[in-house]
Amino acid sequence: MSINCDICTKSNPSTNLFCGHCGAKIGPLDVETVHQRLLELEAQLGAGEQKYLEVDTAEKVQKRVVKWAAAYIGCGIILFAVLTTIVGKDISSLNNLAATARQSVQPIIDDATKKAGEAQKLANDSLQQVKSLESNVRSSQERVASLNTELANQKDQIGRLASIVNEGQLKVKALQAQVDSQTQSVVNLQKITNTAVLSKNKESISAAYPMFGQHFAQSRQGIMDPSQKKQGTDWVVLDIVAANSYRPSLREDDIAKAESQMQADNFVPFVGGVSLVAQTRTVTQGVGMGFYDGSCQNIGHFPSLTPCILYFNPQKRTRALVLQSVLKTAMNIPDEDIRYIDPETQPDSVQELLRLSGVDFVVELVSK
């Protein structure tokens, strides 16, 4: 397969990039090459015009030569033939060059015209698309503006609704506070009612069972109050146990003298024992253990009925010996029968009795 050169129109193999005859580039020409060829063609056309001028001048010269050759016929004929040959050759070459230029440029012009039409069509299509895009943009802008307006209106509505909701919440809180207050009032009233009922029930139970009443320490002289104890005095429970009540070994006078001496030595005797009692408004009832008959065995843990002196504060040992000396007028109590009793080792009832009575010593005299 061969391809013709656009410049010299000579045939070349299809694999050639340049013409093997004139050296021109083979194949479709770009705009720059076409422009260069047009410039060359313009130059060649200019040269052709120059040749036409030369031909015109040659003709005029020919006429002068003919006139001059009238005298010299032979030379004139020869000269005329030569000039005719030269001018004829130049005109033929010029025609061939113009034909070749037209053949070479025409495909380029046709291709450029085609591409120009395509470009115009593309430009028209692009312009139409731009106009459509502008229309879409305007439509979108109008839609966005409408949405912004609608959004602003919705924000206003939301703000109003939020204000209404907040107002409603405040009202609900106020109502809740009122309900809570009333509920608390009901609860308080219920507590008062329950307390009154409970108090009445307790009073009823205490009246029937004094053991549920208030506890006191009681002697034969009455309710004992430790807050009334004078400073420097010791309270003594003096109990007399008669093994033989018909013929007691203890003498009443001796006991009376011992009691008087106790008082002189700042001892306060409570004769006849002390008991832990529960008391109501109308009834008194003994509860728990008391300081009376059998205290030496029950509290002092003596093996048998024995006279004794019990004290509950280790610092009271000296005073216990003084008490022993005072009691000799009535009964002699050996040293080994004077014992310290730790309150913490005693039952709760004994500890309570010591606290409520304020007793410092328990003395038990035995009449055999």
Image: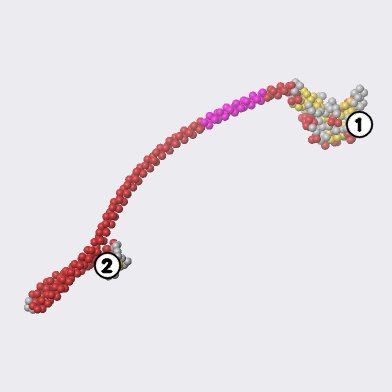
Magenta-colored span:
172-197
Question: Against 335, is 106 above or below?
Answer: below
Q: Looking at the picture, how far across and down is residue 294, in whole percent?
A: 85, 29
**Which structural element holds mark 1?**
loop
Q: Looking at the picture, how far across and down is residue 226, in whole percent?
A: 78, 29
* Residue pointed to by mark 1: 332
Q: Is residue 223 left or right of residue 258?
A: left
Residue type highlighted by circle 1: Asn
Quarter holding the C terminus is top right
- How is colour applied across the structure in the image? secondary structure
Main SS class of the magenta portion in the image: helix
Residue type highlighted by circle 2: Ser
Q: Is residue 143 left or right of residue 71?
A: right
Crowding at dot 1, Cα within 10 Å, few <14 / some 14-19 / many 20+, comes out as some
Within the magenta stretch, is there residue 193?
yes
* Residue pointed to by mark 2: 11
Question: Against 114, is 172 above or below?
Answer: above
Instruction: Tell me the distance, in whole angstroms, between the alpha carbons under discs 1 and 2.
Output: 170 Å
Q: Nearer the viewer, residue 338 or 48?
A: 48
Q: Is residue 135 left or right of residue 93?
A: right
Identified at 79% across, 32% down, the residue is 347
Question: Against 26, is 261 above or below?
Answer: above
Identified at 31% across, 48% down, the residue is 131
